[in-house]
Amino acid sequence: MRRRRLLLGLCALALATSARPAHAQYPPVVTRSRLDPSRGVNFHAILLPDTIFVGQQATYQIGVFLNQEVRQRLRRNPEFVPPETRSLLVYELPDAKSPLVGNIDGRAYEVHVFQRAFFALSPGRYDVPASKLTYALPQTASFFSREDTHSLRSEELTLVVLPIPTAGRPADWAGAVGNWHSRLRTDSASGRVGNPLVVTLRIEGQGNVALLPRPRLDVPGAGVVAADERVELDSTPSTLRGAKEFDWLVTPKAEGRLIIPAQHFSYFDPVARRFEAAATSSITVSVSAGDAVGVDSAAYQPLAAAPVAAPGASVLTIRDELGGESSFAWLTAPWFALLMLLAPLPALVGAFRRRRPASGCATPARPRRPTRRRCGASRTTPSATASAWTSGSRSPMACSSPCCGTRASPQTPRAAPTRCCARSMRPRSPGRPMAPRRHAASWPPSTPPSTPRRAAARRCGDPSGCPSRDFSSRPAL
Amino acid sequence: MPVSGWARQGDDAGRAFQRGREAYASGDYARAERAFLDITRTQPRNVTAWANAGTAAWQAADTARAVQGWQRALRLSPLDYTLRDRLALARAVQDRGPARVPPVPVQLGTVLALVLWLAGWTVLARRAWRGRPVARWAAGLTLACAALVLAATWLDDIDRGRRFAVVTRPEPLRALPVLGADRGVAPLTGEVALILARQGAWAQVRLDGKREGWIATEFLLPLGGD
């Protein structure tokens, strides 16, 4: 009977402890998001709280809601791309080991929750862009079915960061935000003059522990030098917490009782919205006589607090005249780019004229390209060749290109077809002898040809000649 | 009216300069530094204002601001050896690595490139109009000028200091841009860092001696951006 009563009591206790409201077990993104039941996948983000103080944590939660049908069709996990937040310190918070499964609005969902901790270092308004979720679903139930890729975006959120209030701010507050406790300890309860002790202040609690500033330690009768710092981060599923230890090397200057005073570490509690102080108790260390060597206490001044300009040092002089502004290199000046672009133009124009000789000095009646008829005419009969040569417009072996006319000469008939001519002539038909060979046999023509310069002058219609068109000796560009 | 605006800016700068001088003479170095920095807001390329701001910061025991002022002045006037002497006062090395400013005039590379380009194309134009070949010469000229422009761009990048910053606190460099990452070496206050990348409130920096790591941007003072 006793055993039965004990069993009943244990059951009642278990029921009582488990009788918390169901929604308290779920992250806010699950309880606050509005789901669209028509969609197989819902993707929502939430920022809690959305208004914080500088240095306070805001938790960014992402919820991926998969209904039962989609969950069964998914072959691989969806890909989640977190938002890229600028000017915010971001810490990954551990995700739940297994997804949440339950009914929302009468539908079965599997919910995956991802979390991040945001910290702002300065007041203002920060936009948190949307997260992106990509997943693929097969088109049919077949294993070999193709997949359709879907993409979802979460809500874009805004974080408002308030400055730390100035009312009630302690004079020794150095920027710590959170909820902290502190403890002071030394590595030894006794020491000797000149032998440094390690004094450690451990501050632990909730908040961004890495941002905790080093407090100031003053020990009367001892030299103090700042030493190491250690950070222990402990990210529980929803908040960032941990401990930070600050070491000092404290060197007693005289024997007796060295009292390391109690420390008051001021911080701002963003939840209570007021300044608090984490206090420690003082520590007393008994100091015995040291070595015979004297200790120069000045050498143990903390470097960080030492003034850069030593007292009594000569004051640097400043400049008496306010000069004008200097200029940077002209690389980005528009006129520089313009000059660089315009400089090659004259040379390019010159080179272009060299490459296109017929376009500048040709008579209006002259065709630009040689024709087969003209070239053929010059090849058919010696008389036609001679008349063409007399007119000064044709080489007996050449086409109508002006460069050919200036190139050809009676003395060097075989060398007449220059590159320009060869380019303009078409391939001769098979079985038809090449005309210039026959002409070469009847050389010279009845009327002696004029000099190339004169011939060029005739073509130009300018008695002074057209020296600029005398391209015969110019190599190509 | 722009002209009156410039005149007003000049008057303001003159008054701020006078204020800074008086504050410096009276030993109020912090106020003098603020006055000189006020000038740099309207005249961001004023060598005198930056140099005096650096000197006032040094006297006010603000090493990082002092290095910032002198470095910015030196990058505007690389041949000013008095600024190099001032920078040598800082514990952090200022003549090696990212802190080094080559003693080369700001416009040297640009002027050389421009003169070579114009002269070269003038000669080439003459050749082209005489019917001589210019292609090879043009290619050579373009390559030479491109090399000079690249050198000038490199110098200009240093002078503008857009990717450089001064470390304000000997915070250890992190292996990754998170506070829980492994901590590496701690730079000296006033050390000049080359910023390789930025990610949120973190910057990946390289210091003298190929020391690299991430540091919170709140511990950096920019050397560029006017």
Image (cartoon, coloured by chain):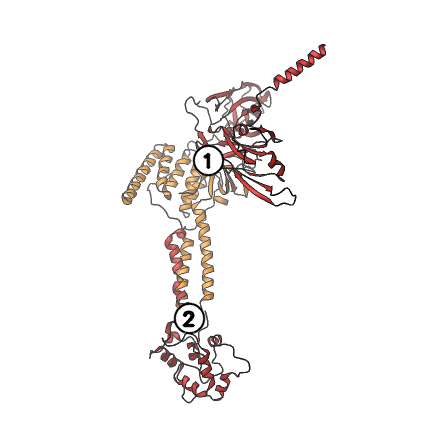
Chain colours: A red, B orange
Residue B49: image tag: none
Q: Chain of mark 2?
A: A
> Which residue was labeled with disc 2?
A356
Q: Residues within 10 Å of mark 1 (few under 14, many from 20)?
A: few
Mark 2, secondary structure of its residue: loop
> Which residue was labeled with disc 1?
A127
Closest to the camera, between mark 2 and mark 1, is: 1
Residue B204's place in the image compared with B137, above or below, is above
Q: Position of residue A195 (x, y in %)?
A: 58, 25
Q: Chain of mark 1?
A: A
Pick the front one: A26 or B46? A26
On the image, which quarter does residue A431 sit in? bottom right
| CA gap, disc 2 and disc 1 | 62 Å
Q: Residues within 10 Å of mark 2 (few under 14, many from 20)?
A: few
Residue A234 shows up from this direction? no
Amino acid at dot 2: Arg
On the image, which quarter does residue B58 sit in? top left
Amino acid at dot 1: Asp
Residue A436 shows up from this direction? yes
Pick the front one: B45 or B86? B45
Q: Position of residue A407 (x, y in %)?
A: 44, 79
Pick the front one: A111 or A285? A111
Q: Position of residue A383 (x, y in %)?
A: 43, 88
